[in-house]
Image: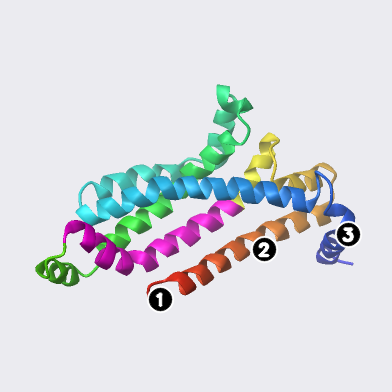
Amino acid sequence: MGVLGEAWNWLADGANWSGESGVWHRLGEHVYVSGLALLISCAVALPIGLWLGHTGRGGALAVNVSNVGRAVPVFAVLALFMVSPLRSAGYVPTVTALVLFAVPPLLTNAYVGMREVDRSVVEAARGMGMSGTQLFRQVELPLARPLVMTGLRSAAVQVVATATIAAMVGQGGLGRIITAGFNTYDTAQVVAGAVLVAALALLVEGFLVAADRLLGPVRR
């Protein structure tokens, strides 16, 4: 039996799904950390990116500053927080590191999406007497939505995949299944943990695609 077959047997074993070290518990931890980090990232990056794209001022600087988060390894940020007073603050270090990682694609896509709206459409809307707020909500935001959603899907998948790094500092999530497999030299468990993370990332992206299609302005 190959490694994939052994990984399947590991996943099919009900004992591996129950208890504090089981899949369901680790999945709940993973979803909690990833979801919280993504919500905070959206609350920070999207308003800034959309507003800067609307005004056309300072956007390039903001995007360049946010992209610094891509150049800094997430594990290095997490390790730095773990030796600070925040090390006893639960998931705060992990969530903070993931937020720094998720902000760049969200802010960049929001800004670029707003700036790529056809200027002739914007000028026509102004000529019709629309205020700045009406222009933002009724013209620019709907037209920028596809690129904004692309950034959201990208950030969500990256956060779900990267959240496994929390296990390296003893915190929860599906990464604990992978690290436990490494510690016991159980290759099947390592592969099973990786499959679970990949499946969750695909599920999240599929959910966002479906939500975008169902709730988008074209559907309405």
Secondary element at tag 1: loop
* Residue 15 in the image: above or below residue 210: above
The residue carrying mark 3 is 13
Picture quarter containing residue 78? Answer: top right
Q: Residue at x 81, y 41 (%)?
A: 183
Q: Amino acid at mark 1?
A: Arg
Query: What span is in magenta?
Result: 131-160
The residue carrying mark 1 is 220
Secondary element at tag 2: helix
Closest to the observer, 49 or 100 = 49
Q: Residue at x 71, y 59 (%)?
A: 196
Tell me if label 3 and label 1 are in contact, CB under 8 Å. Answer: no
Q: Residues within 10 Å of mark 2 (few under 14, many from 20)?
A: few
Closest to the observer, 24 or 175 = 24
The residue carrying mark 2 is 199
Mark 2 vs mark 1, CA separation in Å: 30 Å
| Residue 200 seen from this side | yes
Q: Residues within 10 Å of mark 3 (few under 14, many from 20)?
A: few
Quarter of the image containing the C terminus? bottom left
The tag earlier along the polypeptide, 2 or 1, is 2
Quarter of the image containing the N terminus? bottom right
Q: Amino acid at mark 2?
A: Ala
Q: Give the label, 3 or 1, closer to the camera.
A: 1
The image shows residue 170 at horizontal and vertical percentages of 71, 35
Q: Is 145 one of the magenta-colored residues? A: yes
